Image: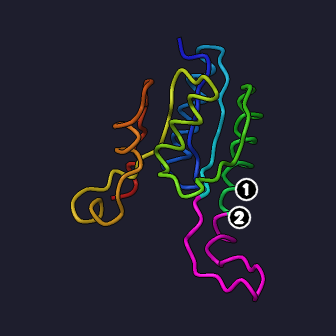
Amino acid sequence: MYKKILVAVDGSRASRRALDEAVRIAKATEGTVAAVSIVSHTSQLVDVSSGFAAAPDDVVASTTTTTALEEAKEVFAQAKVNGTTRAVDTYGEEIALVIQRVAAEDGADLIVMGTHGRSGMKRLLVGSVAESLLRVADRPVLLVRDEGEK
């Protein structure tokens, strides 16, 4: 049923649970998993004459992305599941829309994503990529909640 599974990874416990679930589904269906990490750069004012300098947040995002994708490769190898990894830059686009676009480009049958399960004021302030993805998705989405975070 689900032969091509896209899983969003970001290095959090919730995304690790989503990765594990995507691998379980792929093993059961003899499918493949594509782990994607979305990189979103912060906007910044730039003095053109001063040259280019990476913002500290961009360095952290790059390190987190690399770590999350390396972890996915290890999980694929241990589980003996066919999997690929890739990082995708948002270029200012909403993260949920980027995940949806990548799923469409890859022909994914299922999108798996972790959610922190925030509610109330935390959800209002931080927002929910998972909720946004549910609103725009044109294919099944499986949300895996991290029970450890509140």
Q: Position of residue 7 (x, y in %)?
A: 57, 37
Instruction: Count the numbered circles shown.
Output: 2
Image point (62%, 48%), residue name: 37
Mark 2: which amino acid?
Thr
| Relative to 137, 51 lies left or right | right
State the SS at label 2. Answer: helix
Image point (33%, 50%), residue name: 117
Q: Which disc number belongs to residue 63? A: 2
How dense is the environment of label 2, judged by Cα within 10 Å: few (below 14), some, or many (20 and up)?
few
Q: Residue 59 lies in magenta, yes or no? A: yes
Residue farthest to the front, as pictured:
49
* 98 vs 74, nearest the viewer: 98
The reply to whether dot 2 and dot 1 touch (C-beta < 8 Å) is yes
Image point (42%, 32%), residue name: 137
Separation (CA) of disc 2 from disc 1: 5 Å
The quadrant in which residue 67 appears is bottom right
Q: In the rendered image of this protein, does residue 98 appear above or below residue 55?
A: above
Mark 1: which amino acid?
Thr
Which image quadrant: the C terminus? bottom left
On the image, numbered disc 1 is attached to which residue? Answer: 66
The quadrant in which residue 149 appears is bottom left
* 28 vs 2, nearest the viewer: 2
Q: Position of residue 109 (x, y in %)?
A: 54, 20
- The magenta segment is 40-61
Q: What colour scheme does the image use?
A: rainbow
Q: In the rendered image of this protein, does residue 110 appear above or below residue 89?
A: above
